[in-house]
Image: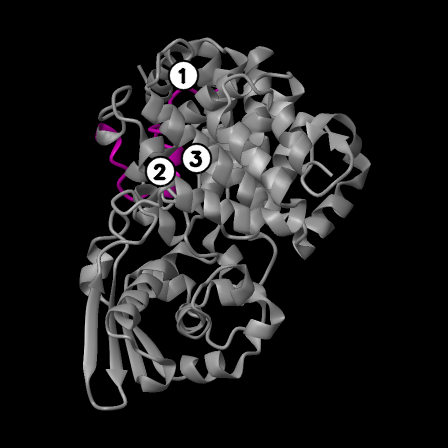
Amino acid sequence: MTLLQKFAEFIEASQSVRYSDEVFNHARRALLDWQGALIAGSNAEAADKLRLAYQDEIGFGGCSISGSSKKSSVRTAAFINGTISHIAEFDDIFRDGAYHPACPTISSVFALAEANELSIQPLLRAIIAGYEVSTRIAKVIQPSHYEFFHTTGTVGVFGSAAACSQLLGLNAAQACDALATAGTFASGLQQAFRSDSMTKPMHAGHAAEVGVNAALTAKAGMTGTADLLEGLAGFGAAMSKNPRWSEVFDGLGSSYNITKMTFKNHGCCGHTFPAIDGIAYLISEYNVKPEDIKKIKIGAYRATCDVCAYRHPASQFEAKFSLTYTVAARIILGRVREKAFLPDALSHSAIYALEDRIEFYLDAECSSKFPEHRSAKVEIHLQNGGVLTHHQLTRHGDPDDPLSDQELVDKFLELTEPRIGLTAAEKLVDLTMTSQDAGVKELSNIWFK
């Protein structure tokens, strides 16, 4: 039996398994957080350009497009919503796999559920399956995969295909075909977000579209290559130095990775979070004011140094991938949410000046613990000669220091109230987090223009 065949058996079995209330609650958290990220990205310039590019494919079908008054087909909705939900950099993370599962997984299966006029319960079950399959693949191909590839674009195709296969009720043979077909379309290069471009979020959209297309074609009888993961010319061989396939099924069916998600507390690249949290700890613990700071030193793991190296960012994109800017913004503004990336903040003289006093370096210990631990070593050198140090071992929002349900809701309301209003936002929270029989269309009708 190949790896995909075993995953496919899990997908078929998951259609009847009884999940605990805890697992369902975590699926609800993921669904709420995805909607927050989707709504937050809906009025971005990149979202406007994307909807314009797809104007000939919008205006027919039964699926909602964020930020549009017109509907579309399942495939188009999966691609556009998958892209838009990754724009604002507020979507969830599977830390151990350096992977954002929500955008590709939920965007595709939400569109499919909406088109079939399903309720929230089958949607949640499909999300659980999609997260479980894709996060496991993401974990065992790291850290080498992340040297060149964007896991959300590559592994995201498996999350999308697994969730859609589960929702469609595919049998194991069909689900295997869907996963295999999806895997051969996996793509997304790191270089796409080492410069200021709009490509990165499209990786998530592409993965969402690939997965739903793979599931639909498998249902129609299209076949795939069952050993696509472990084959000599397969996914693992091409995209990872030493994939640990022997670990990929550890705890399958008994321990669910959707309960181990990171939900972002800051609106930027997750590789900046340990330093932001570490600095926040020091300035709170010792009541440090900006004028007290002579310089700051940050020891970080390699991905932070490689991906977040912008200094004095010239755009919102660069700011979200700038370690020096986000740390300075946390000190000056008090938070690193949406306001930290508005034009007034990007031109803030105090943030600019403080950036010049921040340096970072590659720390061997932090690097050795990646990706399972996202840590940073921070030092604040004070004007009076004192030095404050802290080793931030995790991020607030990681599974070992999770956001509470209330913190998650507060973040959601902060992102959505300016765009859809408080009444609508609170209704969306209630339906997503508590309703047993709400239709998926009831959710989309709230954020659909």
Q: Which residue is at a point 50% across and 17% down the rendered structure image?
A: 122
Q: What x and y, as percent, mark residue 359?
A: 33, 78
| Residue 115 as seen in the image, left or right of residue 61 | left
Mark 2 neighbour class, 10 Å CA radius: few under 14, some 14 to 19, many 20 or more: many
Q: CA distance from mark 3 to mark 1?
A: 21 Å
Q: Main secondary structure of the magenta part?
A: loop
Give the mark, 2 or 1, whose residue is nearer the N terminus.
Answer: 1
Nearer the camera: disc 3 or disc 2: 3
Q: Which residue is at a point 26% across and 78% down the rendered structure image?
A: 380
Q: Which residue is at a point 48% across and 50% down the rendered structure image?
A: 189
Quarter of image, res 231: top left
Task: Give the residue at mark 2.
Answer: 138
Work out which quarter of the rendered image holds the C terminus and state it: top right
> Is residue 36 depicted above or below 435 in this figure?
below
* Tag 1: amino acid: Ile
Does the magenta run of residues contain 259? no
| Residue 163 as seen in the image, left or right of residue 389 | right
Q: CA distance from mark 2 to mark 1?
A: 17 Å
| Residue 88 as seen in the image, left or right of residue 80 | left
Secondary structure under tag 1 reads helix
Task: Give the residue at mark 3.
Answer: 29
The mark total stands at: 3
Mark 1 neighbour class, 10 Å CA radius: few under 14, some 14 to 19, many 20 or more: many
Q: What x and y, as percent, mark residue 433?
A: 47, 30
Q: What x and y, as percent, mark residue 365?
A: 18, 61
Give the mark, 3 or 2, whose residue is nearer the N terminus.
Answer: 3
Q: CA distance from mark 3 to mark 2?
A: 21 Å
Label disc, if present, on residue 11 of the rendered structure: 1
> Is residue 291 depicted above or below 253 in this figure?
below
* Residue 184 in view: no
Secondary structure under tag 2 reads helix
Viewer-nearest residue: 429 or 189: 429
